[in-house]
Amino acid sequence: MAWIALRVLRGFGAHLGLAGFLFVLLFSLMAPPARAQRTQLKPSSLNAFTPQQDIEVGKRAAADAERQLAMCNAPKVDAYLTQLGTRLVAKLPTNGVQYPFEFHCVNDKAINAFALPGGYVFINRGAIEVADNEAQLAAVMAHELSHVALRHGTNQATKAEAAQGFMGIVSGIFGGSTGGAILTGLGAFAAGGVLLRYSRTAESQADVMGTQVLYDAGYDPRAMAQFFEKLEAETKGKNPPEFLSDHPNPEHRVERVEEEIDKVGGPQPNAKRDSSEFEAIKREVLALPVAKKSGPRGPGPPPPPSGSFAEYHSDFFTLKYPDNWKKYPGGEGGEREGISFAPENGVLDDGSGHSALAYGLIVGFANVNGDPGDDKALSSGTEQVIGELQRANPDMKIVRRGERLRLNGQPGLSAYLSNESPAGGQETDWVITVLRPEGMIYFVCVAPQSSFDKYDKTFNAILDSVRFPK
Ligand SMILES: [Zn+2]
């Protein structure tokens, strides 16, 4: 310590008075290193997955993403992203976990990037094209890598399972979570959607850790704030950047990044901002042919419904459904949360990272009181159910409404609605409502309009099999 103080004095002594002398002495004795003041972040303990499962889940979802997305197929670009990513990873605090980081360029002009659990990072060409320099691209990548290190994806899936009644879907995805058995219930990329729905808190954490990583890797950390300012500016255009729908803007995003830049010690005088490699890669990316917009997401139509049936029993009804369909319980509220039945490939990503049923049957409950035989209660309850469905699906329209039928001898109403199908095009939703002593039970039979006829027989067979307890 004394030796260090002496060196400082030799260097500056000539220009300092007594106060300066004391200041330098005190400063050299007391000033904590700038690192100590930075925000400390670590993964939330709320996580049903182990880091090893993060890798397994991410690897499956990444393989599926590569099949479904148009990739740049530009080895030089991927090699450059890998080199840049590796430089950032060297400064990424992973709590000792060795993630198998991979970096891929996606041939999509939308400004976006995403990282799957376990370290599979995808960067759209749009994000490379919009970056002014290497430091800004490094900022996006450092943000994505922070989501991996902070294990936000599986934390999010854990929370969704606990809070939003994703029980069935998540256990469908992760059921028997060893190797090949993972992700059986849904297309793996749809599972990715569940894994990529970050909270604003998670976003802010990724911004803060990303700023630290950027700084530690020798880049000008102000590039993080500059990139977000750029995105804000783009938001005012007619196509808000996709990045902001996957990575929702936390409050005071830019201010929080600037605060962290101060905490890490401010921009370094020799910070790296750009490189000739970045400029060369950006030119190469700009020259790539534009990929055709990929068709509807999803792994193709489901196999036809089996002619043999399995039985489902609850306290409120029983029914039979094709034995090659799976059950997706609606939530943790037990049987009153409802249940869905869908074939393989029948549940898809709706394009915004949410799982949506494209083929199959949803059974739900609504709080409607009234005598099961009361016509008025049945029709007003049916209006209520349809209204709720429309609120959840703003594009849903009524095609035909209010036809009477009987389900297991009970009076019911039937209506047809149309909606955008997550499989592309329009879908038909056939809604049947029955008033029961415990409330209204509704059945929604769902299939794309173009194939509804093929499912009509199956839906009728399921509805014919419904039995209510006496
Ligand atoms: Zn993010």
Image: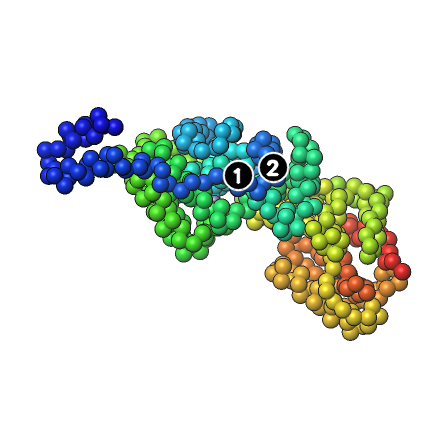
Q: Contact (CB < 8 A) between labels 1 and 2?
A: yes
- Residue at horizontal 82%, vertical 48%? 312
- Rendering coords of residue 123 (x, y %): 47, 38
- Residue pointed to by mark 2: 49
- Rendering coords of residue 258 (x, y %): 34, 47
Count of numbered marks: 2
- Residue 234's mark? none
The residue carrying pointer 2 sits among few (fewer than 14), some (14 to 19) or many (20 or more) residues within 10 Å by Cα, namely some
Q: Residue furthest top?
A: 3
Give the SS element for disc 2.
Answer: loop
Give the SS element for disc 1.
Answer: loop
Mark 1 or 2, nearer chain start: 2
> Taking 71 as reference, is 260 left or right?
left
- Residue at horizontal 76%, vertical 69%? 369
Report the amino acid beneath label 2: Phe
- Residue pointed to by mark 1: 151
Which sits in the foreground, 168 or 47? 47
